[in-house]
Amino acid sequence: MLADQPGLTPEQTIELQQLAEALNDQLRSSSSSGAEKAFGLGCGLGLLPVLGIILILWLFDVLSLIPGLLLSVVGMIALLGVSLLLAQVARQNAARRLYTDEIEPEIAHFLSEQQIDRPFFDTVASQSLPGDAPLQAFLSPKQLDADGAADQDS
């Protein structure tokens, strides 16, 4: 269990943890959906030119069966790599867009209602979420002193 942050009540700390977990789940599901679509599209559309080139080479007797199969395997491996790269870029862009458009305003609204400063949310969320959580990329946790004030070093 995460220790209470200075300047926050235990209830506020729990609410911040719950908000961070909910927003992180929202980010994860949205970015995964975009990545899956990009991967499927990359594989589906990218396979057509590879198969087309192999078919044309085979029809003109430039390529026999065994080199054709080998070229198919190499082409599909290259296509898989490119599709994975596109999926990763799509995941990052979807997460960034969702954070900017929906999650950041939701955090700001919640914090203004609760009269809590952003460094408190970032610190609690950073400590309560796993290191690979998508929301971690958008947090700027601060070291808080005993009074609950954020250090002004950075």
Image (spheres, rainbow, N blue to C red):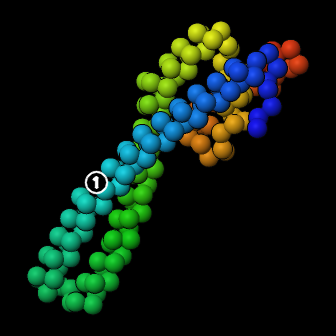
Residue located at (59% from left, 10% from top): 112
Q: Position of residue 126 (x, y in %)?
A: 69, 34
Q: Which residue is mark 1?
A: 41
Q: Position of residue 53 (x, y in %)?
A: 20, 72
Q: How many marks?
A: 1
State the residue in front, 53 or 84.
Answer: 84
Q: For the N terminus, which image quadrant?
A: top right
> In screen coordinates, is 90 left or right of 17?
left
Residue type for callout 1: Leu
State the residue in front, 82 or 4.
Answer: 4
Question: Toward which corner of the image does residue 12 lie, by quadrant?
Answer: top right
Residue located at (14% from left, 76% from top): 56
> In screen coordinates, is 95 left or right of 66?
right
Q: Position of residue 102 (x, y in %)?
A: 45, 24
Q: Position of residue 137 (x, y in %)?
A: 60, 37
Residue located at (76% from left, 34% from top): 2
Q: Residue 81, relative to residue 11: is it above or below? A: below
* Element assignment for label 1: helix
Q: Point out the residue furthest to the right here.
A: 146
